[in-house]
Amino acid sequence: MLRLRAPGFAPLCAPCAPVPGLLRALRGRLPASGMRPVLRRLLAVALVAAPIPAAAASAAEALRIAWDRDLYNPQAEVDDVLVPVPCGGAMVFRWVAADGTVPAGSSAATRALYGLRGPFAYRAPGEGTGQPALLVGKYEVTALQHAALQAASGGSCPAVDAAGRRVQGRVAWQDAVQAAAGWSVWLAERAAGVPDCASALVLCVPRVADGDRVMARLPTEAEWEYAARGGVKVTPEQFAAPLYPMPEGLRGHAWFADNADGRVRPIGYRAANPLGLHDVYGNVEELQLGLNRDRRYPGQVGAAVIRGGSVHSGAEDLRAGRRSEVPLYGPGGVIRAPDNGYRLLLDRAPGAVGPIALASGLAAPGAARTQPGHLQVNVDVAAEVRLDGRAVGRAVPGAPLALRGLAPGEHALEVSAQGYGRVRESPTVGAARWTQVAVALPAARGLWGWWADLSLASERAGLPSWLPSGVGLLVLTGVTLLWRRVVARVGAGGGEGTAPPVVRATEPEVAERRAPTVLKAAALEQPTLIPPTHAFEPEMIALPGGEFWMGSPEDESGRRSDEGPRHRVRIEPFGIGKTQVTFGQYDAFCEATGRVKPEDRGWDRGERPVINVSWHDAMAYAQWLSKETERSYRLPTEAEWEYAARAGTQTPFWTGRDIHTDQANYDAAYDYNDWGRRIGVYRGKTVVVGSLPANPWGLHEVLGNVWEWTSSEYAERYAGAEQRCAESKGAAGRVLRGGSWYHEPGLLRAAARIWYPPVIRNAYSGFRLARTLGGFREDLVPVTPVEGGKTDRIDEPAGAPDVTADPAPREDLIDTPRPPTLHASAPTQAEPRVSEITAPTLFCPSMPSSPR
């Protein structure tokens, strides 16, 4: 069956589509031999349309398209399928043949894709039999369409203007699923008076066999990839290639880093793939229906999968097989990343009683929406955790179990460990808040319970697991009762809060415990923006104090010997720059003091991070800014920097176990963990600050772009220097953190560190300011929820080797020294005890005192 959707033809609006214009359009698209059946079909439609029942006519009138065609279908084709949306609009879909036939010689990966079978029957022009097919959105959902879909759930209709043609970004997975569910209900209520898409020449709603309803939803990953590769419109060899055939070249088919200027673009300006789908690569990352859950971390709510790349993706990222993830929730609630959008697919609704929205596992449109809450369980010994009768994971001292996406209300919590009594509690989880409990497990009576206490105490004391002395057994058991109480309390952060818990130290109780104890910690403050008071002053974010694990675990790929010993560090509240200091901000200092401005290598100045500045230059800038603003600016200590960069995470990067050039500026010619997957693009220079996603605490480009000077003196092993400001006149090496545009991803890990002499200047080093807060409280506003945090999903192979080699130097940077690898000339200190490195005194003699 041929569906006529020619340019100049507006469904259900005869005056807008004169027959001669339609015939001219068809003559240009169809061969002469194909015109006769088309004319016969037009005549039949004209004869049948006259006696349309009044009810159908009124329904059609109500669903007339009022939008200009450029807003919903700027590249019209004769076999497009137009489905109505609220507010007088439409969304265009394409038939994607999918009958489950697998071509001979297909690989295992492509066999699974070819095996898809569509729920609809598509009859091609001149054919009488139906072919199973999918109905896939021709374009990514635009801003106008997204607003109209929200109107289906009770919202107001949007203003119709040209800006609505731009693809909608900043969409959460939850937003897309709810918009599709609301539209599904809206369509079901109006389908009776609208023709089936398999037999209509006009605006339609598709039907499926057995009278089941049709619903809109996000595509599964398999459906998306099958359509992106070109389905049966390409040869099996072309289908298996990273990209479908592109006669116009990649720039003619996709908006990406090379041609988009970092801005999401309108629909219809790039060529379609062989199935007639536009922007399957680039523009916005497209959300997928299924959530990813890491098998190694049970109890996770999951992360949204995104496919296709965006306007910030490099050419190497635009591949059919590439997939990334974005967390569902951040400290401020639902994550709406600027590059995330969606494309819809039509399907048969699940066979369930009630509205389609409920069958999809969502609240009905217009129903009250309650945000989920989160629970963190802190323990004093390694323990198994069950929630509401279901095993959800394992918590250990120093690594509490975080449970996200829980229904608000009371939950049944059960914590148990071999050799200890079982603890049952009923914590109440608040909506959109973190709740914490600290569980101290009582030792079970008997030999095993005593031995469990002894093992924990001997481990903490650095002694062997066996202790033959009965006296030692009794003494250490008594010590362990007190120590475990400290561990449980130290492991607890805030009782409730909107930000992820940050561990705080508390005073140990000395009273003997006689029963299971659950201790609720105090509420935490969230990261807070400090607006600048001067035009040349950087934006700062005030971070709450807390404790964190500094350094890398011994099994972290790429780890170097100076990243340990891993130890807990307590950080007092402080402020840190939202971005790296820019040329514009630093140039104001140079003009005010008569200093020579640093060279920018021809990359432009303005909002790019300042480069070619030494440690002394950065310190001088902080002193000048402190004097001008009457605030206490300085460089962050190494510990403060890592605390801020990690933002509550313990993975190699704040993005997770790996990182992508959509998230940081580095050289993607090198991969992390030697997984054989070089992903992303090498930009070859810095990027404008704030152009890449912020970490969960609101810091942009904290990994990559430029190495950041810290105020701390370098030492080969952590012994306290990482928590202090170095003497301003000393010549010892100063630590830099974060990696740069020139370096491989392994050097962007939160624990990675290098050092330079304080006089060195080069093209890949800059700095980010810190600020001593003291009692400063005014002019604080909450930080915007995290936007981004996307993580490429890579399954880690067993026994993956570490990557430690530096890349070969490039000729274009031969004039600037490459950052040194770990210098063996620094003095070696003995490994400190934890008690020696967790109570720092911040001493910054070079910083002027400030009244604020």
Image (cartoon, helix red, strand yellow):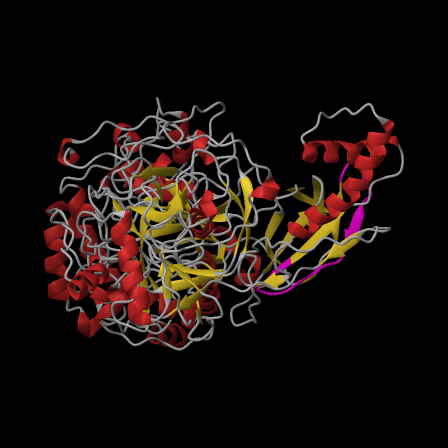
Q: Position of residue 628 (x, y in %)?
A: 28, 70
Whether the magenta-drawn stretch holds residue 682 is answered as no
Q: Quadrant of the C terminus?
A: bottom left
- Count of numbered circles in the view: 0
Classify residue 749 by image quadrant: top left
758 over 695 or under it: above or below: above
167 over 794 or under it: above or below: below
Classify residue 524 by image quadrant: bottom right
**In terms of depth relative to the viewer, which is nearer, 62 or 358?**
358
Residue situated furthest front in the rendering: 729
**In terms of depth relative to the viewer, which is nearer, 253 or 234?**
253
Q: Position of residue 645 (x, y in %)?
A: 42, 49
Whether the magenta-drawn stretch holds residue 433 is answered as yes
**In terms of depth relative to the viewer, which is nearer, 446 or 677?**
446
Q: Position of residue 526 (x, y in %)?
A: 51, 63
**In terms of depth relative to the viewer, which is nearer, 619 or 441?**
619
Classify residue 38 by image quadrant: bottom left
Q: Is residue 819 visible?
A: yes
The residue stretch that appears in magenta: 417-435
Horizontal relation, residue 401 to residue 143: left or right:
right
Horizontal relation, residue 424 to residue 798: left or right:
right
Q: Is residue 279 visible?
A: no
Q: Position of residue 88 (x, y in %)?
A: 32, 73
Classified by dominant secondary structure, the portion drawn in magenta counts as: loop
Residue situated furthest right in the rendering: 446
